[in-house]
């Protein structure tokens, strides 16, 4: 039985205005993590993240990043903000946003892998 069938792969929640972001993240994490997309316009992101039990979260808006920061800081949940207007990725590390590099799919993948597999301090 594969990891996907047993549900043992990490769950990455992509909360975005742009569904294509989740497609790109899913392609980069294929065989490593399960990726689920949630529209950024939904209310109560904190409640969603608290209920979902995700292993990492990717957001693409300032509003979602602000709301998800509260959950991530309290729980240690890895949080990645893809800043589309700046072509940059930010990572929440020790309660502070730090630059994670350009917003390429490969950069997003690498940031998530470091966070998911314990190579980076988050939240």
Image: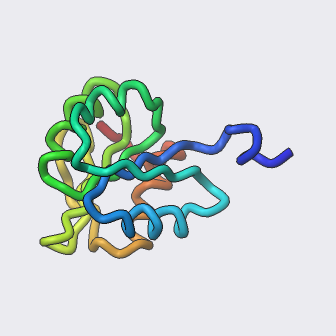
**Relative horizontal placement of residue 87, taking residue 29 as reference (left or right):** left
Where does the C terminus fall, quadrant-wise?
A: top left
Q: Identify the residue at image location x=14%, y=41%.
A: 66
Q: Is residue 72 left or right of residue 112?
A: left
The N terminus - image quarter: top right
Q: Is residue 54 left or right of 86 when viewed as pictured?
A: right
Closest to the observer, 59 or 48? 48
Residue 29 position in % (x across, y down): 55, 61
What is the quadrant of residue 57 in the picture? top left
Residue 91, x across and y down, in percent: 27, 52
Q: Quadrant of residue 108?
A: bottom left
Q: Residue at x 23, y 31 (%)?
A: 44
In the image, residue 46 sits, relative to residue 39, either above or below, namely above
Identify the residue at horizontal 50%, vertical 55% (top origin): 113
Pinpoint residue 31: horizontal percent, then vertical percent: 67, 59
In the displayed structure, does residue 85 sit left or right of residue 106? left
* Residue 106 percent coordinates (x, y): 44, 72
């Amino acid at each position: 039985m594969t990891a996907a069938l047993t549900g043992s792969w990490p769950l990455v929640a992509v909360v975005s205005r742009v569904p294509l972001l989740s497609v790109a993240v899913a392609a980069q994490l294929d065989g490593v993590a399960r990726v689920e997309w949630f529209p950024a316009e939904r209310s109560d992101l904190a409640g969603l993240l608290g209920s979902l039990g995700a292993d990492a979260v990717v957001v693409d808006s300032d509003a979602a990043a602000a709301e998800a920061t509260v959950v991530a800081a309290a729980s240690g949940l890895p949080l990645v903000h893809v800043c589309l207007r700046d072509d940059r990725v930010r990572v929440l590390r020790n309660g502070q946003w730090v630059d994670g590099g350009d917003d390429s799919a490969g950069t997003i993948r690498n940031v998530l892998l470091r966070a998911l597999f314990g190579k980076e301090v988050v939240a």
